Image (cartoon, rainbow, N blue to C red):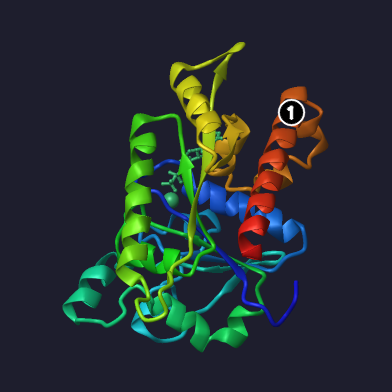
Amino acid sequence: MEEEKFPIVLTAALPAGGTGKTPFIRVYGEWKARQGYKVALIDLDHQCSLSELYDVYEIENTSLNLFKGGEVNFIPVEENIWLLPAHPNLQYEPARLRAEGTQNIYFLLEDWLYEHEELIKRFDYLLIDTHPDTDTLTKNALAVSTAQIGVVMPTEKSTNAIPKAEQALSDLKVDTYDKRHKEDRVTCELLLMGTDIEKIGKHYTKLSRQLLSLISDDNRFVGYIPHKELFAQAFSDEKQSIWTQLEKDSVVKEKSNQTFKYQLEGVMLAMDKKVEELSWH
Ligand SMILES: Nc1ncnc2c1ncn2[C@@H]1O[C@H](COP(=O)(O)OP(=O)(O)O)[C@@H](O)[C@H]1O
Ligand SMILES: [Mg+2]
């Protein structure tokens, strides 16, 4: 929590929709905020899912201005958490930037962060949510990130997206390689996080079993979040923090909820450890 340092930047990105990226950003952001860190969430998805989770429907001073210029407004949404909401027109940004022949097209966000150093250094963590693609805005986020978190569900669509994410990150590194200094300009590492792993009775579902086996074989996986109805609910109608739910006596008095809380905390700690290792480099 030192004032003078740039925050640690993490981006949830996987080129497949509905795999739990947005929930992960919120859950991890709230986890860090509860540890006392100052957390900025940036919604870069034109579908605005993260912004809507916090009931923010702002269309002025949004993350669109990171690329277009103009003011941006980090809105306080919870204790220690600020949100820079998305704008639907982010959708048209990659094509617009290309049409304008923008130079250094993958470092626009990096430039913005340096230009707003004073504002940005007030935060300890910058967590970026993206649209499920590998386009320019997502690459801008990866270019400033310590890690890309590919959130993976037990679905074919989701596991098929892992090599695509890997390829896109590798392409970005090749495209931006600094030939003069012979070094990578982009140092982001791909990490993976499983979610929605489901047990029916005593047995895992077939797809969950397959994902669990993938998780144990691939050390980029930091861990997984088990399937939990309470978790799903926190991201649908109620939109209440899962951590707030898991603090309620009425909730934790049920053993299965207590187990889930314990598992979720375990995964969050594993992520903390991994991120810490990467940021030492
Ligand atoms: N561990 C889990 N248990 C229950 N539901 C989950 C779990 N992980 C993710 N989900 C649900 O999966 C859905 C997918 O999230 P979504 O925001 O659509 O993903 P993305 O941001 O990747 O497009 C959400 O409704 C979320 O509640
Ligand atoms: Mg999303």
**For the point 63% across and 63% down, which residue is it?**
279
- Which of the 4 image quadrants contains residue 44? bottom left
On screen, 248 above or below 100?
above
- Which of the 4 image quadrants contains residue 93? bottom left
Q: Judge: label 1 CB < 8 Å from ligand 1.
A: no
The percent coordinates of residue 249 (x first, y second) are 82, 36
Q: Residues within 10 Å of mark 1 (few under 14, many from 20)?
A: few
Q: Is residue 213 left or right of residue 256?
A: left
The reply to whether residue 131 is in sight is yes
Q: Which amino acid does label 1 sit on?
A: Thr
Q: Residue furthest left?
A: 99
The percent coordinates of residue 260 (x first, y second) are 69, 31
Q: Nearer the viewer, residue 182 or 118?
A: 182
Q: Which of 166 and 130 is in front in this view?
A: 166
**For the point 20% across and 75% down, which residue is it?**
98
The percent coordinates of residue 14 (x first, y second) are 40, 48
Q: In this view, does 65 lie to the left or right of 193?
A: left
User: Which quarter shows the N terminus?
Assistant: bottom right
**For the point 50% across and 20% down, which residue is it?**
209
**In the rendered image, which residue does mark 1 sit on?**
259
Secondary structure state at the residue bearing disc 1: helix
User: Which quarter shows the C terminus?
Assistant: bottom right
The percent coordinates of residue 119 (x first, y second) are 60, 83
The reply to whether residue 61 is in sight is no
Q: Which residue lies furthest to the top in this view?
A: 202
